[in-house]
Image: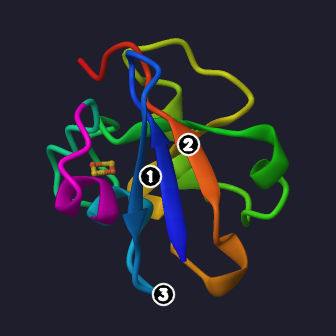
Amino acid sequence: PTINYILKDGTIRSVEAQVGSSVMENAIRGNVRGIDAECGGSCSCATCHVYVEEAFFDRLPPPDDMENELLDGVASERLPSSRLSCQLSVTAALDGLTVRVPETQS
Ligand code: FES
């Protein structure tokens, strides 16, 4: 499945992702700037914040309590579409998933 990342300058970067990997891991692998992921995916840093494009938001399982709590502490504004990308697992159904990188992660 392809994941699209909208960078801060508006350009789109597409990464070919493996099923079962996280949206954060693919950002790191694809050198997507603006996703820091300081904790390496253990859901404790909130620096992998992304905004999920509306068309895909409802296809994602909702955040668990821990993600939800961390989302309250993200550096950029928390929007209804905010998610932590390390908690988003790539599935075949998510082909074309598009996420926007926030203004800042810290
Ligand atoms: Fe740290 Fe996602 S990488 S919370």
Q: Residues within 10 Å of mark 1 (few under 14, many from 20)?
A: many
Q: CA distance from mark 3 to mark 2?
A: 17 Å
Q: Nearer the viewer, residue 48 or 93?
A: 93
In this rendering, position of residue 59 left or right of residue 44: right
Residue placed at 17% from the left, 51% from the top? 39
Q: Is residue 95 above or below residue 105?
A: below
**What residue type is disc 1 on?**
Ser
Residue placed at 44% from the left, 52% from the top? 85
Q: In terms of sequence position, does the residue under pointer 3 or pointer 2 come before the other?
A: 3
Where the C terminus falls, by quadrant?
Answer: top left
Tell whether circle 3 marks a residue whose Cβ is less than 8 angstroms from ligand 1. no
**What residue type is disc 2 on?**
Val
| Residue 46 at x, y percent in the picture | 34, 37
Circles 1 and 2: CB atoms closer than 8 Å: yes
Where the N terminus falls, by quadrant?
Answer: bottom right
Identify residue for label 2. Answer: 99
In the rendered structure, find residue 85 and report the number of the disc placed on it.
1
Tell whether circle 1 marks a residue whose Cβ is less than 8 angstroms from ligand 1. yes
